[in-house]
Amino acid sequence: MFRLLGFGLVMALCLTSQGVAGGEVEARVIGGTEIEQGNKWPWMAAVNYVPGPESTRKSLICGGTLIAPRWVLTAAHCVINSQGQRTLPDNLLVVVGSAHRDGSGGEHLRVAAVRTHPNYNRDGLHNDIALLQLASPATVAPVNVAGAAQLDYLGAVGRNALFTALGWGRTRANDPASGARLLHEVSLGYVPGKQCRSTWRSVTGSQICAGGAGAVDTCTGDSGGPLVLEHDGTQWLVGITSYGAQECGSPGVPGVYTSAASFSGWMEQTATGQLVDLASSSRSDNTSGSRFTTRVVTSAISNESALTQASAVGWRLRSDAPVSVRSLDGLTCTQRGGITDCRSQTVLSVGQQANPRRFEISYSGQTDADVELEVTPIASQHNYRQRANDVIGLRFSEKPDLSLHLLREVLADRRARVTVQLANDAPHVAAEGTQLRVFLPGGTRIANLEAAGCVNGVPVVCDLGTLRPEEARDLPLDIEVGSGEGELRFELAARNGSYPLSDAERSMPASGLLASARSGGGGGGSLGWLALPALALLRLLRQRRH
């Protein structure tokens, strides 16, 4: 029993010849690297067999993934043997938050219930998924479970998508004693379904395939562990390690993983209403202004769960700077550190959206700052698909906000017209005594110096006077190119400063002034790499919703 539930469990499975030939499958990191810090993947779980509920003797069965404080996702074949017997909860111990095979430094958690998919097919390893309900909640943060957006991303990028697989399994394919003492990670490429089915004919849409160009793979002992995708700045659990070739790392043979996104409804149902999928959409109509004025953020939440009704829906606002948050709609808000939770009594059915709520943001810092405010929906249930893409940039500054970008047109006689587009993007303060300073390399000069209102020198100085709030101007400069060596630098400055400075400085190589424009037609045109729109560069001030 002890041996069967260990690395040899899936080796006992006999798969049909149509899908996977008997003896070709391993419960399968080959070619990976060690992880010495457990906090890199804190939600990585080690699923261990123990003789009884009081025993401290344990043996690693499989990997798993913490998807909620009380729920670990793993493979069904990890907890069902070849006779169809399910492992008892008292015989399982889960460890999270440790990179060590022995679980040192991690949380040791008993299992209260084992839930396997009712349609698990051990002959073809279809529906190879199970949930372990923990007797007590884990304190480490769970991973997010992939959804439709991540599957769409895989479909769009195809083979260019890269995953990370994790496990303590064999590091040498044919060496049973090569189980890793430290957690290993390996990068694997996405293998589209059609290509995968040329090797594994029984693969379905609820499975995902991954492999590498060399001898990289998951292997015996890695079953049940995670296949992770980095997307939109978030780690997503895409797959659960299921099976692969008997010879781990066989060239051209991908591994097969249960698609987590395909089982969202089953997970929600099995977790008895403890998992919910909430999304938020937020905006602010006044992102930039004085440090001493407030901003108002409006946010709406929708329930995108498959089955679960969300209760006590609320908003979590997280900031990287000292701000205070006040609900303008009577919600109760509590703040700890840079996190504010604002709760309501709202109940959201599947597909329903809560009425938008307004939040007043006050900045208490002593210096000008760009503040990122991240909005995350919360509820009494665990939000297992936190998108982390509802971010609003707020600027608190007492200075003008100067910006410039450059457009180029090739003229005759080794001349080019550079139109300097200048702006003060601040809505509340004028830029006084504004100057454009142009640093030219040797042999290069501005031909229309007087017409442009500029004075020759090092640098060339063009006095612009006052730029009103949100005023923009164009200044065309006809530049006669010398040897084409060196760099031109443009700086926009005001007597009362600018925040941030980076938006008010641009440079370009002199050799690029006379280069042919890439866009077709006409005698001139803008050169893409010189076109640096100020409004696009600022865009910390716009909400980043994807």
Image (tube, rainbow, N blue to C red):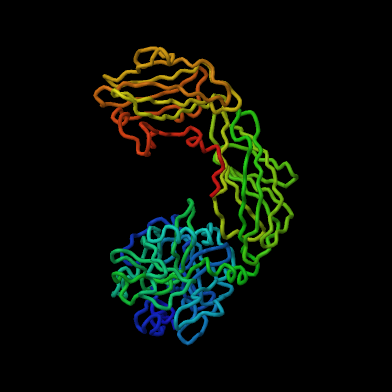
x%, y% of residue 528? 39, 37
- What count of labels does the image hold? 0
Q: Is residue 495 above or below residue 160?
A: above
x%, y% of residue 235? 48, 56
Q: Is residue 56 above or below residue 513?
A: below
Q: Quadrant of residue 458?
A: top left
Please indicate whether residue 416 sits to the left or right of residue 81 in the image. Answer: left
Q: Quadrant of the N terminus?
A: bottom left
Q: Is residue 432 above or below residue 189?
A: above
x%, y% of residue 493? 46, 21
Q: Quadrant of residue 478?
A: top left
Please indicate whether residue 346 sits to the left or right of residue 183 in the image. Answer: right
Residue extending furthest toward the left: 483
Residue extending furthest toward the bottom: 83
x%, y% of residue 286? 63, 35
Choose between 472 and 241: the one closer to the eye. 472
Q: Quadrant of residue 292?
A: top right
Q: Is residue 490 above or below residue 276?
A: above
